[in-house]
Amino acid sequence: MVETITTPIILSDSAVTQLKRIMGEQKVPADYGLRVGVKGGGCSGFSYILGFDVQKDKDQQFEVKGLKVFMEKAHSMYLLGMEIDWLEGLNNRGFTFSNPNADESCGCGSSFSA
């Protein structure tokens, strides 16, 4: 039986554009991918992990709009269906996380409780 793994997160076009720009500017090696995850902490209980890293043993690998994405399998229950976007406005510039699994989010938008 073939296991079908769906992509657990959504990256907006503007987020992909910024991630590719950052990868180019920082000369991120080709074997690195985008790490998305959670860690304990933050004002609401969990905070998001977003950065570039190599694949580790516990990771699942996905391809989202041409980007390699690494995520620990255990994190998918917190992140399934999350959308990462890039906003560029007068008062807010940066990545945003819209997580349907979050019971509460903090004012800064980078932590949540589930």
Image (tube, helix red, strand yellow):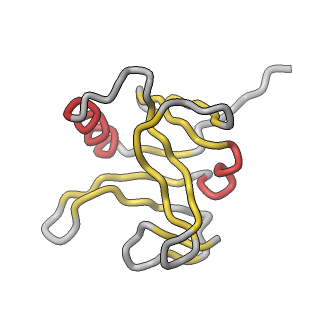
> What residue is drawn where x is 60% and y is 73%?
113
Q: Is residue 18 left or right of residue 49?
A: left
**Residue 73 falls in which quadrant of the image?**
top right
- Determine the image quadrant of residue 18: top left
**Residue 69 location in percent, x, y?**
50, 35
Please name the residue shown 62% across and 64% down the image: 101
Picture layout, residue 71 above or below residue 31: below
Q: Position of residue 1 (x, y in %)?
A: 86, 20
Q: Quadrant of the C terminus?
A: bottom right
106 or 80, which is in the foreground? 106
Callout count? 0
Question: Could you say where residue 49 lies in the image, as x and y percent from the top left?
Answer: 48, 53
For the point 49% across and 59% down, the residue is 48
Q: Position of residue 62 (x, y in %)?
A: 56, 31
Residue in front for this viewpoint, 44 or 100:
44
The front one of 29 and 101 is: 29
**Left or right of residue 61: residue 105:** left
- Looking at the image, the residue that sits furthest to the right is 1
Q: Residue at x 25, y 28 (%)?
A: 27
Tell which of 64 and 54 is nearer to you: 54
Is residue 44 placed above or below 56 in the rendered structure? below
Relative to 2, say whether 58 is above or below.
below
